[in-house]
Amino acid sequence: MMTPTYHIVPLADQGVLIDCGETIDIEVNRWIEAAALAVRAAGIAGVIGIVPTYRSLAIEYDSATITQRELTARLDALLAALSVGQRRSRRWRIPVVYGGEFGIDFDDFRRRHELSRDELIARHTAPDYRVFMIGFMPGFAYLGGLDPRLHTPRRDSPRTRTPAGSISVGGQQTAFASVEAPSGWHLLGRTPVRNFAVGRTPPILIEAGDCVRFDAIDGARFETLQQDRDWLPDWEWIESGEANP
């Protein structure tokens, strides 16, 4: 792929941002992922934090170890040699209960799009979604690859509280939440998966660059999985090119 246009700009007093603009694009996101992996692998002395987003990469550093000018020069050289190719990623299978008390916007959402219950579930569970980024709240996964038929503007009135594990749609994306949080997205269902858990190693299961596929389950299965403290979702290795954009 072609290298996107980027700028390295200061981020507060001990950070820099590799900024690729404002567009959400699968190829830009793949480049950001590759850049994050390259910076980690380089082991630059003084770099203490790396946070990839849709189209930017935030890097925190210790100014007592490396100056901003030195870090920027290292990053420029690293990015000039960056190559983005195929790589293995994880495809997670995330169980979801759709509708009812688990997805309070489900019926309004399907009527809005003139879909039956089964049609909406089929469309939402069909893609392999790319995890563009983890953010907003701990473990909140922003997913790209939503069926264009399901693109929907966010709610006019956000809710101040939505349940942990909520599966939702906002704009051209779908997402799943790990913790209870405010949200203006449409709630379609809920999963027993908690992408973030204090005391677990690692605390975040699903990372940027992974893929997610949803599997519909019923309420009884949800309760069984939620009560099993040792249960974790299944995953498999795939080539990065297999996932839908």
Image (tube, helix red, strand yellow):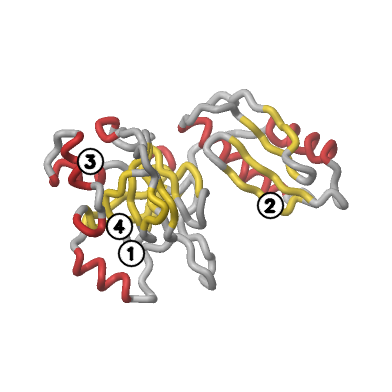
The reply to whether callout 3 and callout 2 are in contact (CB within 8 Å) is: no
Closer to the chain start, of discs 3 and 2, is 2
Indicate the position of residue 97 as horizontal and vertical percent values.
23, 58
Label 4 residue SS:
strand
Closer to the chain start, of discs 2 and 1, is 2
Q: Nearer the viewer, residue 73 or 78?
A: 73
**Mark 4 or mark 3: which is in front?**
3
Q: Which residue bears the numbered disc 3?
A: 109
The reply to whether callout 4 and callout 2 are in contact (CB within 8 Å) is: no
Q: Is residue 36 left or right of residue 66?
A: left
Q: Badge 1: few (under 14), some or many (20 or more) residues near its Cα, within 10 Å?
A: many
Q: Residue, x 18% and y 46% (percent of image)?
A: 107
Q: Badge 2: few (under 14), some or many (20 or more) residues near its Cα, within 10 Å?
A: few
The reply to whether callout 4 and callout 1 are in contact (CB within 8 Å) is: yes
Q: Nearer the viewer, residue 109 or 211?
A: 109
Indicate the position of residue 33 as horizontal and vertical percent values.
56, 41
Q: Which residue bears the numbered disc 4?
A: 190
Q: Amino acid at mark 1?
A: Pro
Closer to the chain start, of discs 4 and 2, is 2
Q: In 3D space, how far apart are the residues under numbered discs 2 and 1 (Cα atoms)? A: 30 Å
Q: Is residue 110 left or right of residue 70?
A: left
Q: Nearer the viewer, residue 11 or 30?
A: 11
Q: Residue 216: which quarter of the image? A: bottom left
Q: Which residue bears the numbered disc 1?
A: 192
Q: Which residue bears the numbered disc 2?
A: 49
Q: In 3D space, how far apart are the residues under numbered discs 1 and 3 (Cα atoms)? A: 22 Å
Q: Residue 155: which quarter of the image? A: top left
Q: Is residue 208 left or right of residue 111?
A: right
Q: Is residue 230 left or right of residue 222?
A: right
